[in-house]
Amino acid sequence: MNHRTRPFLVAALLSLAIAQVSVAQAPTPGERWRTTMSMEAMGMKMPGQTTEVCAPKNASNSPPVDNDQCQGTNPRQKGKTLIVDMVCKNGMTGTMEMTQESPTRWNSRMVANTREGQMTMVMNSEKLPGECDASEMERKVNKMIKQGNEQQAAACLDAARSGNVQMFVGEVASCKDKASIDAFCGNAKTAKGYNALSRQQRMATGRAASTVPAAYRNAIASTGKLCGFAPETVRKQLCSASQSKKEWTFFAEECPELADPIGKRECVGRDFTTPVAPAYTEFCSAWSSAKRGEYPSSSSGSDGSSDTSSSEGNGNTSAQRGGNSASGSNSGAGHDGQPADAGQGDKPKPTEAAKEALKKGKDALKGLFGR
C-alpha cells in the first residue's frame, strides 16, 4: 500500500482513541492527533466527543486485519478516500469511508447495521504539532483493563457469596472465572447458600416466563449442573446437618418432610395458655415464618406436594394465621414478589435499543482496529 494510504489507517486508529498493541513499554516516538466523533442511531444522537491521542509514527501500512471480534474486508481506494467493509461477530455490518483532506486533516464516516437498527458515526481529526510518547496510551489502557478485571472479579466474588444465580448461569451470566465459580459452588452447598438459591427459585415459580429470567426459575438444577453436584443429595445432607445444628431457617424451608411433622406437633394450636415448649421456640418461629412466606413446595428440595399443614389445628397460632396469607412478603423479592433484579422481558425499549446500537458500534469498531 502506498504512502497516501497510511494516514487513513492512522486516522482510523486515532478516531477510536486507541493505540496499536505493542509489547514494548519503553517510550515510543509518536504524533499527536485531536479527534471528534459523533454518533446517531434511530433518531438518537450522541453529542460530539473530542479526544487527543498519541499514535506511533511508524503506524502499520497494512489495511485492517481480522481479530477475535471484527473483520475488515475489501479495502479499496477511491481518490483520496479509503473504503473498508466490516463484519463483526455480534452481527453488525457496515462500511467505513476515510477521506484525507490534507497531510494533517482527515474525516471519516461509517454507516453500520445492527440488530437494533442502523447507526452512523462521523469522525474528524487533526494532527497537532509536537511529539509524544505513543506507548503511554498503551500503559494507561493496560492499567484500566487491569482495574476493570479486578473490579469484575470482586463483584463476582460478592455475587458468589450472596448466591446471585443470574451472575453465574443463564444467557446473561458474566462471572466465568474459576475463582468466583468455585466460591459460588462452595456457597451453594452450604445451608445459607442453598437456601438463598431455593428462595430465588420459589419466588420465580408461577411468574410469567417472559418476566423472570430462566436462571431464577431453574436456580437449583442449573447450579447443580454448573457445579457438578446432585441437588437432592446435597439437600438431604444439609437437612440432616441443619437439624442437629439447629439451623432452623434452612430446616423449616428446605426440609418439609422433616420439619412439618414437628411443626404440626409442637407449634400448631399453641397459645398463651398452652405455650410452645422452650426447646422448640426458635424452631416454631422459623417454621411459622416459612408458612407465612407461602413458598411453593414445588421448588427443588421439597417433596413435591402442596403443603397445607398450617391450616390444621384449632386456628389460633401464628403459623396457621400466616398460612392463609398469600400476600406475605418474601425476603429478597421486589414489590411484585419476583426477584428484585429479575428481567422484564427480552424486547428492549426504543431508547434502550438505540443505546445498545451505539454501544455495539463503538465496541465493534474497537474490535476492527485492535483493542
Image (tube, helix red, strand yellow):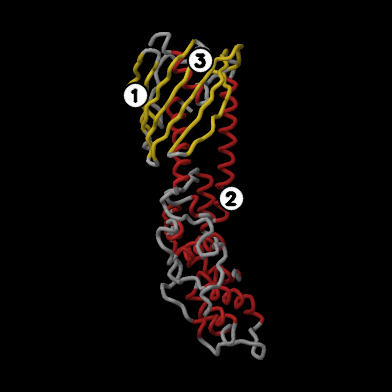
Callout 2 environment at 10 Å: few (<14), some (14 to 19), or many (20+)? Answer: some
Horizontal and vertical percent position of residue 312: 51, 86
Q: What residue type is labelled 1?
A: Thr
Q: On the rendered structure, is 132 left or right of 224?
A: right
Quarter-of-image position of residue 219: bottom left
- Is there CB contact under 8 Å for labels 2 and 1? no
Horizontal and vertical percent position of residue 327: 53, 73
Q: Is mark 2 on a helix, strand or loop?
A: helix
Along the viewing direction, whichever of 154 and 257 lies nearer the viewer? 154
Identify the residue at the far front of this view: 43
Q: Which amino acid does label 2 sit on?
A: Asp
Identify the residue at the far left of this view: 74
Q: On the rendered structure, is 171 left or right of 190?
A: left
| Label annotation for residue 158 | 2
Q: How far apart are marks 1 and 3 (CA)?
A: 25 Å
Q: In this view, does 323 lie above or below 96?
A: below
Residue carrying label 1: 73
Along the viewing direction, whichever of 371 and 95 lies nearer the viewer? 95
Residue carrying label 3: 105
Whether residue 223 is visible: no
| Nearer-N-terminus badge (3/2) | 3
Along the viewing direction, whichever of 31 and 118 lies nearer the viewer? 118
Q: Which residue is found at the position 41% from the left and 51% from the top?
A: 346
Q: Distance between the residues labelled 3 and 2?
A: 48 Å
Whether residue 31 is visible: yes
Q: Nearer the viewer, mark 3 or mark 2?
A: 3
Q: What residue type is labelled 3?
A: Arg
